[in-house]
Image (cartoon, grey):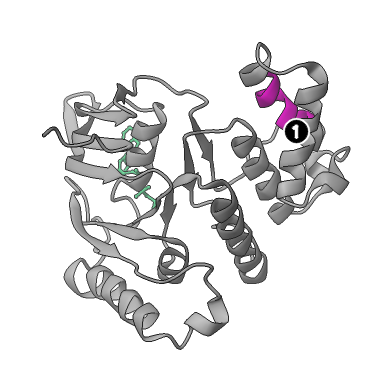
Amino acid sequence: MTQAKPFLAIEGVDKLFRRGAATTEVLKGIDLSVAKGEYISIIGHSGCGKSTLLNIVAGLTEASRGVVLLENKEVREPGPDRAVVFQNHSLLPWLTVYENVALGVDKVFSGRKSAAERREWVMRNLELVHMGHAKDKRPSEISGGMKQRVGIARALAMEPKVLLLDEPFGALDALTRAHLQDEVMRIQAELGTTVMMITHDVDEAVLLSDRIVMLTNGPSARIGEILDVPLARPRDRIRLAADATYLRCRQAVLKFLYERNRFVEAA
Ligand SMILES: Nc1ncnc2c1ncn2[C@@H]1O[C@H](COP(=O)(O)OP(=O)(O)OP(=O)(O)O)[C@@H](O)[C@H]1O
């Protein structure tokens, strides 16, 4: 019997960066399978290679060895099936909120949806992140949290197979951050999106993820441990604050980061 291929597979990925005669091996032998609809977090100390790994899955960076397969197809370049949301929003400042989302929608759906359907689809995605009311505003006229929401709407509007989040809440204040985490959990439950998210935040990783992938310190970072987070959904941050499973998961990640893989500042 042949085994079913995983939805997303990272197989034997190494990444080396060359500058002149010097070579740095950032990632070494990364193997990871992600199921459809799964929420995966990648956590590890600064500079260990988290963004590099996400960029390889996005097709923005080429692996030096190994492959990334999405539904059995090798990832070789960026594509709308893998939408990325970065820490600092990347909205075009001269376009309105609506136009920023429409840009991607028009590109992806021009042959498949009529102009009216595309307009409706842009609005549906803006409503999903509660930003329909701000559709005519420009990025400079809305808050940081609102910009991240629009970035998430723009990514989701392309109906990606995988949503790649590179510290999407990292630049936000704690309250906005908590609010947006709840929104992302709600949206993921509604749409069943597969998510790979980079974070530095242990609580964020435990609250949002089905599994937490912990990277060892670089150079030559590898997957040190993968932790299952067996918490039922929907998840309520206040109730979980005293939940034994939540606290056990949190402690496991803290131990990995601060005991077994303590951060050492490069000389
Ligand atoms: N284009 C590049 N050329 C050379 N070195 C690079 C390049 N991109 C990243 N690196 C190096 O690869 C290592 C990993 O970087 P990366 O940004 O992936 O780490 P990270 O874990 O995401 O860090 P942080 O948490 O601080 O964002 C770093 O040492 C970085 O300097």
Identity of the residue furthest to the left in this view? 1
**Number of disc labels:** 1
| Residue shown at the point (57%, 33%) measured from the top left | 159
Work out whether residue 161 or residue 62 is closer to the camera in this orientation and state it: 161
Task: Check disc 1 and report the residue beneath it.
Answer: 122
The relative height of residue 220 versus residue 260 in the rendered view (above or below) is above
Residue 73, image x and y in percent?
32, 22
**Boundaries of the magenta span:** 99-106
Quarter of the rendered image showing ligand 1: top left
Work out whether residue 59 or residue 70 is closer to the camera in this orientation and state it: 70
Identity of the residue furthest to the top in this view? 111
Work out whether residue 259 or residue 56 is closer to the camera in this orientation and state it: 56
Residue 100 magenta-highlighted: yes
Q: Quadrant of residue 177?
A: bottom right
Quick check: can you spot residue 94?
no
The relative height of residue 154 versus residue 60 in the rendered view (above or below) is below
Helix, strand or loop status at disc 1: helix
| Residue shown at the point (60%, 64%) measured from the top left | 182
Quadrant position of the N terminus in the picture: top left
Q: Quadrant of residue 21?
A: top left
